């Protein structure tokens, strides 16, 4: 199956976020389209919060751009799914909090 080369504006926002995190579009493996607002890639390298910092970069940009990120194990890789939300209010499956709201939510939760 040929790789898709045309994307919706929302899918392109997701691709641009990943390209920024991983140092350019040329570092992304095949992009899999999931609906009209989501994409997935399969990634073989480490994701970290400090040395390299790509995981932290991914989380910060996701909150800034209102894009939901899901990371799950898949064989010898991780699958990264990005779903464009684009707004801060609405139902849980429609919105995405900004970074300040996320920090406030998760730093005040009790174990």
Image (cartoon, rainbow, N blue to C red):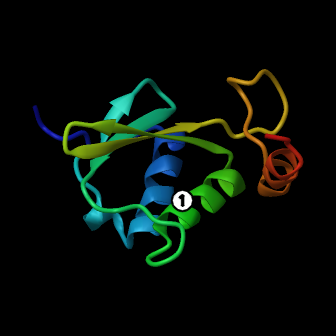
> Is residue 5 shown to the viewer in this render?
no
Q: Residue at x 85, y 42 (%)?
A: 109
Q: Nearer the viewer, residue 25 or 61?
A: 61
> Is residue 77 shown to the viewer in this render?
yes
Task: In the displayed orientation, state which residue is furthest to the bottom.
Answer: 51
Instruction: Give the quadrant of residue 33.
Output: top left
Please give the residue where the numbered disc 1 appears in the rendered image.
58
Counting from the top left corner in percent of width and height, residue 80 is at: 40, 43
Q: Measured along the vertical axis of the image, is residue 55 above or below residue 87?
A: below
Instruction: Give the quadrant of residue 6.
Output: top left
Task: In the displayed orientation, state which residue is furthest to the left.
Answer: 1
Badge 1: residue crowd in 10 Å (few <14, some 14–19, many ≥20)? many
Q: Residue at x 58, y 38 (%)?
A: 84
Q: Measured along the vertical axis of the image, is residue 80 above or below residue 34?
A: below
**Quick check: 75 left or right of 78?**
left
Mark count: 1
Counting from the top left corner in percent of width and height, residue 85 is at: 65, 36
Q: Which of 66 and 109 is in front in this view?
A: 109
Q: Which residue is drawn at 85% across and 32% down?
A: 89
Is disc 1 placed on a helix, strand or loop? helix
Q: Which residue is drawn at 74% across and 32% down?
A: 95
Q: Measured along the vertical axis of the image, is residue 83 above or below residue 5?
A: above
Task: Look at the image and tell me in which quarter the N terminus lies.
Answer: top left
Counting from the top left corner in percent of width and height, residue 25 is at: 33, 63
Q: Which of 98 and 26 is in front in this view?
A: 98
Task: Look at the image and tell me in which quarter the C terminus lies.
Answer: top right
Counting from the top left corner in percent of width and height, residue 28 is at: 29, 58
Instruction: Give the quadrant of residue 32.
Output: top left
Q: Which of 94 and 44 is in front in this view?
A: 44
């Amino acid at each position: 199956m040929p790789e898709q080369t045309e994307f919706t504006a929302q899918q392109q926002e997701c691709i641009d976020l990943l390209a920024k995190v991983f140092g350019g579009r040329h570092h992304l493996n095949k992009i899999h389209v999931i609906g009209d607002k989501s994409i997935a890639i399969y990634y073989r390298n480490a994701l970290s919060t400090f040395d390299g910092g790509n995981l932290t970069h991914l989380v910060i940009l996701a909150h800034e751009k209102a894009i939901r990120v899901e990371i799950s194990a898949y064989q010898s890789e991780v699958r990264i799914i990005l779903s464009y939300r684009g707004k801060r209010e609405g139902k849980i499956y429609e919105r995405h909090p900004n970074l300040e709201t996320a920090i406030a939510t998760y730093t005040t939760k009790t174990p």
